[in-house]
Each structure stands twice: as C-alpha cells, then as structure tokens.
Image (tube, rainbow, N blue to C red):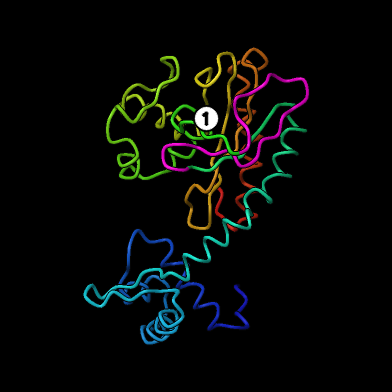
Amino acid sequence: MATASKVPAAESTLRVLTHLAAQRGPTPAAAVASALGLPRSTVYQLLDVLVAQGFVVHLPEEHRYGLGIAAFELSTGFSRQEPLSRLGRPLIAQLVDRLGESAHLVVLHGRDVIYLVEERAAHRPSLVSDVGVRLPAHLTASGRALLAALPAAQLRALYPSQAALEQRDGRGPRSRLELRAVLDRVRTDTYATENGEITPGIASVALAVRDHAGWPAAAIAVTFAHDRFPDDDWPALAATVAATAAELSRRIGGRPR
C-alpha cells in the first residue's frame, strides 16, 4: 500500500507539472484532473498558482494549459548542471572496466548525436568520437537507439527527404525506407548496432536511456574492433550495456525498459 504524502499539496503540484511536461501540447484542465484522479477544483487552484509563478501558461482561447517560461528555466538549469554527464561518467567508466572496450554517452540534437562522455579502454583502436563531437545519428549505434524510440511523426520531421540522410563514403541508410528498416530492426532486437559505418572495422552496440516520461534522454554505446567479437556475441554485449542504461535511467528518475 502506498504511503500517504506528508505534503499532499506539493505532491499534487508536482504531479500536475509532470503531467503537462509529458504531453505533446497544451492540455485542458479537465483532462489533467481526469488523468491524475484529482478534483477539478483542486486542479484549477493548483494551475492558478503555477500560472502566477510562471511555471504554467494559460491559453484562454483554447481553454488549455501548457508549460511556462519558469519551467523552461528549470530545464536550462538542468542542462547547465550537466547531471547526465555527472551521473553517467562513473557508470560509463565501470562499463569500460567490465568489458575492456571503449564506451560513450550521447544525446540527440537535431539529426546529430553529441558525445557527452567518452571513456577509452586501454590498448584499443583510436576513435573519431570524443566529448563534444557531433556525428550523424542515423549512422551511429547510439543515434539509432535514440531514433528508434521516437514517434513516427518526429522521425518524419527529422528526415523529410533522402537529402537529410548524410552519407560517409556511401555507407549507411540511403533512403527513408532503408532507415525505417534499420530502426525496425533496433526495436525487434531491443538494441542498436552499427558496423563500419563510421570507421571501417569498428562496430558499436547501443541502448537508449529513458527519462521519467519514457522518452529517450540519452544513449549508451560500447565500441570495439569488429574482429574481437563475432556477431553471436553482440546480444551478450547488449545485455551488459542495457544494465548500465537501466541504472542511469533509474538515477535520473526514468523508466527503463
């Protein structure tokens, strides 16, 4: 049985904010009340306070509520404090120690992934990736893990035409149909791979890190010389990476899958 909150008003306020943050757009107060199982009068009172403090904006013509500028400022504060990097760095280091291979943590930015953490294993091949480096998401295992977790509409917006699919020496998906097939395979396998599409002879296995709403906040990958691991060993590598991804998801208050 769940323990009753010692500060129910604070808990209800945070539940309202969390619910609004998980929606695709502004939401009617009645829908918030129904989703959270709260009285409408309570929801309206909480929304009034949140609007006054700038955390929520009221759209009177639409009879809906959405996140306000103060909520955005919270998110930028989150970015400035780099919690993903701080929480992820020791986990990535442990993953490298466990596997003896290099590993990294990335986030999605447009059609690219940006490397937040890069841990190199000793006596392993040099890599093109490093902290701050950007690479095309559809060519990397970590990017594919993130893209496979996005809604179809968002994928279409990211890749409206074949021209959006950057190539490296002719490697990687050349059309949206080929990209869809790659991402379908990721969803079936529950992990993403790439083999020589960034650097010939180098392969990667990756999984997404989910946030509190189940959205892909980041991805973790292990990178290795292809001749060190036959394809049959990749699921075992993925299972080890999955444990690290699940732990980072737990640390950021997320819902691992």
- Picture quarter with the N terminus: bottom right
Residue 110 located within the stretch drawn in magenta = yes
Corner quadrant of residue 131? top right
Q: Quadrant of residue 11?
A: bottom right
Identify which residue, 76 or 150, lies in the foreground.
Answer: 76
- Magenta residues, as a range? 109-131
Outermost left residue: 61
Task: Assess disc 1: are there few (<14), some (14-19) or many (≥20) residues with their C-alpha within 10 Å of its C-alpha.
Answer: many
Q: Which residue is mark 1?
A: 141
- Secondary structure found at label 1: helix
Left or right of residue 176: residue 55: right
Look at the picture and state if 37 lies above or below 26.
below
**Quick check: 117 above or below 205?**
below
Q: Position of residue 33 (x, y in %)?
A: 37, 76
On the image, which quarter does residue 37 sit in?
Answer: bottom left
Name the amino acid, label 1: Ala
